[in-house]
Image (tube, rainbow, N blue to C red):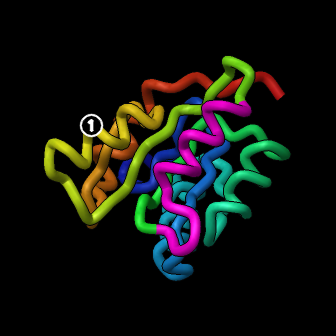
């Protein structure tokens, strides 16, 4: 591996579910995560996210809160309720960053709340704290 390569894969490859109704944002985020050695799946709405969370058992869910139809807060609450105590790391992603927005996402089960546009270095630092689940 070339030490000057800016895309140094993570030593712990995680399965990350990227949930965003903006398909370009979801795909770009997934591709960036893949460049760092993670497996990335995408969903564009709440029901698809819940289905993938149940079938694929991601280690991390990056969850846009402003989803149409089913708000991201509802998605987080459903993931927590269905996780059987093995909840993935939930990271809220939102255009809103007021204290009450952060508190609402925390109450829904999100351990972190990132404001758009997401600081990718900060996201990578959060992912580095996680251990992948055995597959």
- Residue, x 78% and y 22% (percent of image)? 134
* Residue 13 appears anywhere in the view: no
Tell me the residue that label 1 is attached to: 103
Secondary structure at numbered mark 1: helix
Q: Is residue 131 above or below residue 81?
A: above
- Residue, x 66% and y 65% (percent of image)? 43
Is residue 19 in the magenta section?
Answer: no
- Residue, x 64% and y 39% (percent of image)? 79
Which quadrant is home to the C terminus?
Answer: top right
- Residue sitting farthest toward the left: 98
Across and down, in percent, residue 24 comes to 51, 81
The answer to which image quadrant residue 120 occupies is bottom left
- Residue, x 58% and y 50% (percent of image)? 75
- Residue sitting farthest toward the top: 85
Across and down, in percent, residue 11 comes to 56, 31
Q: Main secondary structure of the magenta part?
A: helix
Across and down, in percent, residue 124 comes to 39, 43
Q: Which range of residues does the magenta coloring cover?
A: 67-82
């Amino acid at each position: 591996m070339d030490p000057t390569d800016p895309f140094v894969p993570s030593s712990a490859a995680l399965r990350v579910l990227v949930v965003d109704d903006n398909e370009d944002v979801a795909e770009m985020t997934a591709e960036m995560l893949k460049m760092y050695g993670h497996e990335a799946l995408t969903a564009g709405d709440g029901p698809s996210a819940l289905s993938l969370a149940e079938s694929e058992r991601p280690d991390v869910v990056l969850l846009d809160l402003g989803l149409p139809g089913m708000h991201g807060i509802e998605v987080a609450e459903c993931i927590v309720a269905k996780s059987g105590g093995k909840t993935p790391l939930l990271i809220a992603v939102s255009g809103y960053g007021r204290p009450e927005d952060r508190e609402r996402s925390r109450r829904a089960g999100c351990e972190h709340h990132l404001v758009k546009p997401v600081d990718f270095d900060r996201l990578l630092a959060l992912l580095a704290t996680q251990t992948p689940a055995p597959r």
